[in-house]
């Protein structure tokens, strides 16, 4: 854990307060979050938990639930329930990531 008064913590706090790009990167940071967002963006339809498990076979249930819950918390995706199924889709905020994601896909070092 980083000390709150360390230079790194101060720099991170500054970036978080004054840099929209840094805030965006924090929202989508996570091993599986980009895959989830790309999938929902490409699919254009809601996805089920099973869809994500098929897409990401090596992800644990705990990690998938964590990543989905963080994306819900950050208002990137929304979870809707119908009968015994939960469906995930992008929010308006999540859809606003589409041009950024398109550029990320085209970027090649």
Image: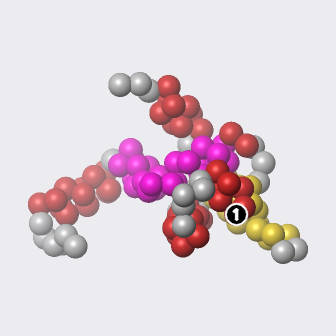
Give the secondary structure at mark 1.
helix
Characterize the magenta stretch by its predominant secondary structure: helix
Horizontal side of 44 relative to 71 (left or right) equals right
Magenta region includes residue 31 = yes
Magenta-tinted stretch: 20-41
- Name the quadrant containing residue 59: bottom right
Q: Nearer the viewer, residue 18 or 96?
A: 96
Horizontal side of 81 relative to 97 (left or right) equals right
In this rendering, is residue 39 above or below 17? above
- Name the quadrant containing residue 16: bottom left
Name the quadrant of the N terminus: bottom left
Q: Nearer the viewer, residue 94 or 52?
A: 52
Task: Look at 65% across and 46% down and name the residue there.
Answer: 39
Magenta region includes residue 51 = no
The reply to whether residue 93 is visible in this rendering is: no
Q: Tell me if mark 1 has few (under 14), some (14-19) or many (20+) residues whose alpha carbon lies within 10 angstroms of its own.
A: some
Task: Look at 28% across and 52% down and name the residue there.
Answer: 15
The reply to whether residue 71 is visible in this rendering is: yes
Task: Look at 54% across and 73% down and name the residue there.
Answer: 62
Q: Residue 92: x percent and y percent?
A: 66, 51
Q: Residue furthest right?
A: 83
Q: Residue furthest front?
A: 58
Figure disc tally: 1
Horizontal side of 6 relative to 48 (left or right) equals left
Task: Look at 60% across and 56% down and name the residue there.
Answer: 57
Q: Nearer the viewer, residue 109 or 15?
A: 109
Name the quadrant of the C terminus: top left
In this rendering, is residue 40 above or below 5? above
Horizontal side of 97 relative to 3 (left or right) equals right
In the rendered image, which residue does mark 1 sit on? Answer: 49
- Name the quadrant containing residue 42: top right
Q: Residue 96: x percent and y percent?
A: 59, 43
């Amino acid at each position: 854990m980083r000390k709150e008064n360390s230079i790194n913590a101060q720099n991170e706090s500054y970036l978080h307060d004054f840099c929209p790009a840094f805030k965006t990167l924090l929202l989508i940071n996570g091993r599986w979050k980009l895959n989830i967002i790309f999938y929902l963006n490409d699919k254009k339809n809601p996805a089920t938990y099973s869809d994500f498990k098929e897409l990401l076979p090596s992800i644990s249930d705990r990690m998938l639930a964590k990543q989905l819950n963080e994306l819900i918390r950050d208002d990137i995706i929304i979870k809707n329930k119908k009968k015994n199924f939960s469906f995930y889709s992008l929010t308006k905020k999540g859809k606003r990531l589409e041009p950024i994601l398109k550029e990320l896909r085209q970027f090649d070092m």
